[in-house]
Amino acid sequence: MTVPIAVLDCDLLLYGRGHRTLDRFKLEDVTDEYLVSMYGFPRQFICYLVDLLGANLSRPTQRSRAISPETQILAALGFYTSGSFQTRMGDAIGISQASMSRCVANVTEALVERASQFIHFPEDDASVQQLKDDFYTLAGMPGVLGLVDCTHVTIKAPNAEDLSYVNEKGLHSLNCLMVCDARGLLLSAETHWPGSLQDRTVLQQSGLRNQFEAGMHKDGWLLGDNSFFLRTWLMTPLHIPETPAEYRYNMAHSATHNIIEQAFWSIRSRFRCLDGSKGTLQYSPEKASHIILACCVLHNIALEHGLDIWSSLTMGQMEQPEEYEYEHMESLDSEAYQVRKELLITHFS
């Protein structure tokens, strides 16, 4: 008798009913060292994610062998931190590559649904003041509400005709606009912009710009490099500093803004699916954008749990950011020039 293949469970075909899976043993059976080496995080962190996402990952199913939230999370963490669906990862948790892919999709969407919970600017006055104080402590730059920059993540070509994702290096990518605080905690992350767009264009079209133009974040500014235009809410370096005050301003700006480069390094080092070493993200731009955002959420949760990758790896290993040639195209925003001039006079003269 012919059995319709649609009713067969791929994990059952591959492993049989007697295969030992993580549905059948506890995290306590393995060491933290093992969990960190395989999935990038210790037991306490993984248990937190199970509590956080468990309801989303326990949706009703027609399958007799539904994969537990715990196993789905381990599968997703394994992919995020290794960038691979290799058999070794699937074998470790007793599921097929196809199931690994479904787990990544489920966990990614659950994390994206919680992005606003973990990635946001502080709202109360005390937290905003603490944010400014933390930045000022770094290098004496006052009034800073965040550091803004863009980073590219390579993806597969959407189709042969679509050139909007081809960046300056000729690679298909997403250009991700992010803001972080003095710890590298992300305050904003827009991960969906096509790689062909310049950084200043991304910012011009972003929700982040709309927030600041609407006055949602008052009495302060972001720091950005010269790939962006000077704005009343965005302080950039002087292209050619001439006075001692201008040099001091540029030095303080550079020392402070460097934190976001460290944050990018931290995210790529922890989530190898984003660093290109395993190739490009083999997903549509929309799904790749969600994976990037999910990793950003995990980055923030990790920092909140004291899992700072900067302290676990030698900072000397950090790759230096690539140098780009930017056109010297300051905006004609006279009010922004005046804000920066007053900042120079008040704090750096």
Image (spheres, rainbow, N blue to C red):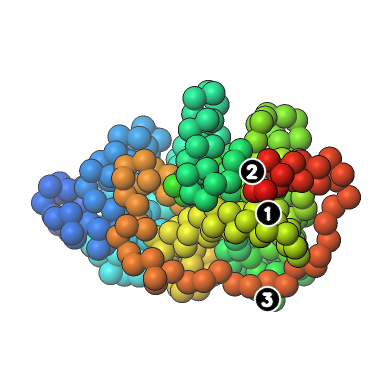
Residue 310 locus on image (x, y percent): 37, 58
Circle 3 — which element? loop
Q: Is residue 240 above or below residue 53?
A: below
* Residue 245 found in image quarter: bottom right
Residue sitting at 59 percent across and 41 percent down?
Answer: 142
Distance from label 3 to label 2 (Cα)?
39 Å
Where is mark 2, residue-wise?
347
Residue 90 locus on image (x, y percent): 30, 63
Residue 101 locus on image (x, y percent): 42, 57
Q: Is residue 233 left or right of residue 39?
A: right
* Residue 33 found in image quarter: bottom left
Residue sitting at 54 percent across and 23 percent down?
Answer: 125
Q: Is residue 184 left or right of residue 34?
A: right
Where is mark 3, residue-wise?
169
> What amino acid type is highlighted by mark number 2?
His
Residue sitting at 13 percent across and 55 percent down?
Answer: 30
> What amino acid type is highlighted by mark number 3?
Lys
Local crowd size for mark 1, using a 10 Å CA cut-off: few (<14), some (14–19), many (≥20): some
- The numbered mark at residue 245 is 1
Please state which of the two labelled residues, at mark 1 or mark 3, is closer to the viewer.
1
Precedes in sequence: disc 3 or disc 2: 3
> What amino acid type is highlighted by mark number 1?
Ala
Tell me if residue 58 can be seen: no
Q: Is residue 8 left or right of residue 266?
A: left
- Between residue 14 and residue 211, name the one nearer to us: 211
Q: Pick the quarter of the image with the N terminus.
A: bottom left
- The reply to whether dot 1 and dot 3 touch (C-beta < 8 Å) is no
